[in-house]
Amino acid sequence: MATELMARAQIMSTSMAMPTGALKTSTSGLVRAVGLRSSVSSQGLFLKSRSASTSTARRSVTRSVLEAPRVEQSATEAGALNPAEVLIQKLGAMGAPNDTELHKMSDLADRLFLWDDVPKLATKQTFTVYELNEFDRDSPAFLELSRQSVNKIDPETGAHIKALGDQVPFTNKLYDPTLTMRLGITTGICLHMKNYPGRGAPELQQLQFFTPDHYETIMSWYFGDMGHICGMGPFINFQDTLMGITGGSGFFAEARGVVRLHPITPFKFMYTFTISGIPELPKFLLNPLVPPHFGVESHPDALQCKNALPNYTD
């Protein structure tokens, strides 16, 4: 309305100084301008309305994707097998992968890619596993590679004092949180960063082979047909540390998160994973945790692999 009044006022003021022909031309031009402005305003309102409805639709789709896993979890809580457990059973029924040289790798890869069809949860999930050195894998290997001037010999024992450059490759066994099920193995290498004389709890300092050290660690946790997790970060053997998850395969192909490393003794460790981007965890990884202490041992059935993850890594 205000635009039309301004246009009329301009027409009246212009008409007093313009010839009749020019007045008609100017009036029609202003009318067209007012009409065009109204049309543009209407189109703008339409586009805003359309954008708002599209945004609402996108938000509703996002919510539905995030809410889908909750439905699956509630069904699982009722006692049904979740999708991961169903696939683990199927893989177990298939037996060990083809062990011939030509087919073994492709067979293993095909099994791992089956996990792509299992729905992933958007929420974080947490589980804990134990790593035990049971002295049957020739692990660890201490490689005294340091040639720095700080490299010294212990005056009392004559032993090598670890220093920057020393390396410790290792491989140990992996068990579930109850220590009653064999899951697979761990593999990796620790690069020595620094020695901290006198650090660590008194009970740790009394243990044989314990020296308070800081390592940079690159390692993997293997879970048989479920695939594996890769991690990297600090390992300080007298306190808890956090390592980053750098990748994985199979069940853990899209894993993102961190793992808390809790050293129990120089040969026993507990890992607590907090991960997103993976399917719903199987129940055997969520069983009640055996509290960590110096005397933790694997159950005889797990030690002898009578109770083990199907096709577990060894």
Image (spheres, rainbow, N blue to C red):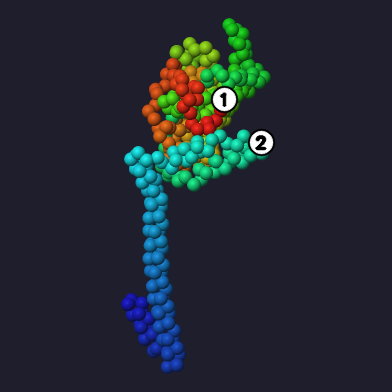
Which residue in the structure is indicated by mark 2? 101
Which residue in the structure is indicated by mark 1? 171
Q: 286 or 47: which is nearer to us?
A: 286
Q: Is 163 rendered above or below residue 83?
A: above
Q: Residue at x 52, y 20 (%)?
A: 133
Q: Are marks 2 and 1 in contact (CB under 8 Å)?
A: no
User: What's under tag 1, amino acid-wise?
Assistant: Thr
Q: Position of residue 123 (x, y in %)?
A: 41, 42
- Label 2: few (<14), some or many (≥20) within 10 Å? few
Q: 131 or 111: which is nearer to us?
A: 111
* Secondary structure beneath label 2: loop
Q: Residue at x 38, y 65 (%)?
A: 49
Quick check: can you spot residue 70? no
Q: Position of residue 219 (x, y in %)?
A: 56, 30
Number of marks in picture: 2
User: What's under tag 2, amino acid-wise?
Assistant: Glu
Q: Position of residue 233 (x, y in %)?
A: 53, 30
- Work out which quarter of the rendered image holds the N terminus and state it: bottom left
Give the left or right position of residue 192, taking residue 89 as reference.
right
Q: 133 or 242: which is nearer to us?
A: 133
Quick check: can you spot residue 73? yes
